[in-house]
Amino acid sequence: MKIRLENLILFFLIICSLSCSSKNDELIIDIDKYKDKLRGFWLGGCIANWTGLPTENQRIDFPFFTDSDFGKDKYDYVTNQNPWGADDDTDIEYVYQYAIEKFNNYKLTGQQISSAWQDHIGLPKLWVSNLAALGQMQNGIIPPETSLPENNPMWEMIDAQLTTEIFGVLAPGRPDIALEMAHLPIRTTAYLHSRWASEFYVIMHSMALLAKPSLTRKEQIFWLAAQARKRIPDWSYIANMYDFVKAEYEANPDKDNWEQTRDKVAQRYQYEVNADYNYRYPWDSGINFAASMVSLFYGEGDYKKTIRIGCMSGWDSDNPTSTWGGLLGFLYGHKGLQKHFEKKDFSDDYFIGRSRYNLPISTDNFTDMANRGINIINSVVVEEMNGLISNNNWIIPINKNPIKKDEHIKTIIPWILIEDTDTRWNYIGFKTKKNQWNASGGSLTFGYKNCKAKIKFKGKAVQYYGYRSPKGGKVKIILDGKNFGEFNLKTDVSEYGQYYVKIFEQENLAESYHTLEIIGDESSNEKTIDMLSIIP
């Protein structure tokens, strides 16, 4: 990533007093001022994340939170963390930045992503599609295959939306480059709709510097969202959710009554089926994207208002809230966040060790993280954007058509889930328990010596997913009376085990009813059933 300096004749065009200026064909960015924005990105995301954590998954059904639930002695802004704790909303982005440095490659390969995840990401602070993807990588599957519906039953969850925004700020003013950099990180855990929701956020972060300074912050936010909407196929439920929430906001005469639109989101997408969206869990990419649009539009570009609404919106509230916290923190910059809270003593320290491991240090700081981001951008500007660096400024050629609609043809994923709690299961010696890591209904079914499970289903393909652990035993699979042999549920890869592991798969079945039996061995070791995935 050697920096190239050339064409000095262009440098007289630089306007050093501005953080960002532009001519017809180029973007000129003051690097020191961008550094302040990167500090704001990290701090803003952390404040929002920690403010949202107390409400995460607390209201996933009526009655939801309202503004009356936010304030002193209730839920309130968290500004006093010292150091700021890592969470999956920020720490996987930290690992991605570290991986770019480690591999000297800002377009990480699938193998590099797999290596970084296995070395630095894992339980006990990992969930849903991230959890499923990690287990696959530990078993030799490489991104993007880790996001495919036939491999990852959690592909439609929120995970990539909260782990990839950093690629936007690492490609200032060039969302085309940002999407290239973010492609495999997004496709590590997301596919189709969840992918487009993630790309929406990446585009907004990348284009933040292109919003005209003459616009109000509200106008800038609305313009950025409109640009990101161009990427999403109109048939996707992500596009439908964006259009619906925006129309509801515009039609609502009371711009403080965001709860009205949130409630309509719940009715339209959680209790009804629209745009081919079927609500599954409060971790869904879809429902949380819709909720994030409520906080974005009604927040109107104000940091505190956006965060407050995001935290009160419901479902997986901390994650989309952290996304907007990072974006608005970037737009306002570190100094601007100080003005929001009339506070100048925010901690600059970041405690990585809370949920990541095996990194060179346990505590970093936002100043260092911003400086390292600048070094990466230096290389991206010169090598990928054909830009220049001079007098502490980036000169970046502008792509006048940076966003292309994804022309992916309308696709309906055939796989549907039969949960371990489904009444069609007949269990002998199995017991279903709550499990905090397992988003699949929040439960996992365990059996031990001589346990048996039997289910009748109608479909032309079936997959059996379970949990592997160091305590795992063996199960015998019988499908329609045919013995397919014994399958091992033991792994020593992780002391915490592996979730959402595909234990058995059979395709090309007759389109009729089938009977599947899962029979545990005579040992007292764990036998587990998470779910079946079938093609009806």
Image (tube, rainbow, N blue to C red):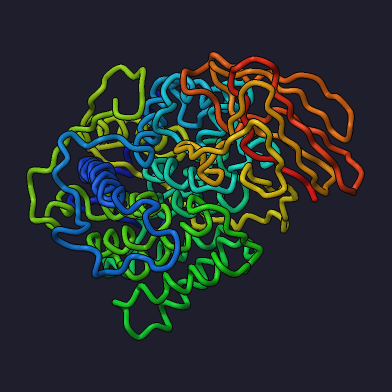
Is residue 275 or residue 388 the one in the foreground?
275
**Picture quarter containing residue 262?**
bottom left
Whether residue 190 sits left or right of residue 283 in the image: it is right
Is residue 36 or residue 399 the one in the foreground?
36
Is residue 137 or residue 100 the one in the foreground?
137
* Residue 222 seen by the camera: no
Q: Is residue 374 above or below residue 361?
A: below
Whether residue 514 sits left or right of residue 134 in the image: it is right
Q: Residue at x 27, y 50 (%)?
A: 48
Percent coordinates x, y for residue 133 in the rendering? 56, 32
Q: Residue at x 21, y 44 (%)?
A: 36
* Residue 211 seen by the camera: yes
Whether residue 252 sits left or right of residue 109 in the image: it is left
Percent coordinates x, y for residue 439 in the rendering? 51, 43
Q: Is residue 117 above or below residue 397?
A: above
Whether residue 31 sits left or right of residue 296 in the image: it is left
Percent coordinates x, y for residue 355 in the rendering? 34, 29
Is residue 325 or residue 8 the one in the foreground?
325
Q: Residue at x 34, y 54 (%)?
A: 321
Image quarter hosting the N terminus: top left
Q: Is residue 508 above or below residue 499?
A: below
Which residue is situated farthest in the bottom direction here? 253
Q: Is residue 33 above or below residue 465?
A: below
**Picture quarter containing residue 153?**
top right
Q: Residue at x 49, y 68 (%)?
A: 266
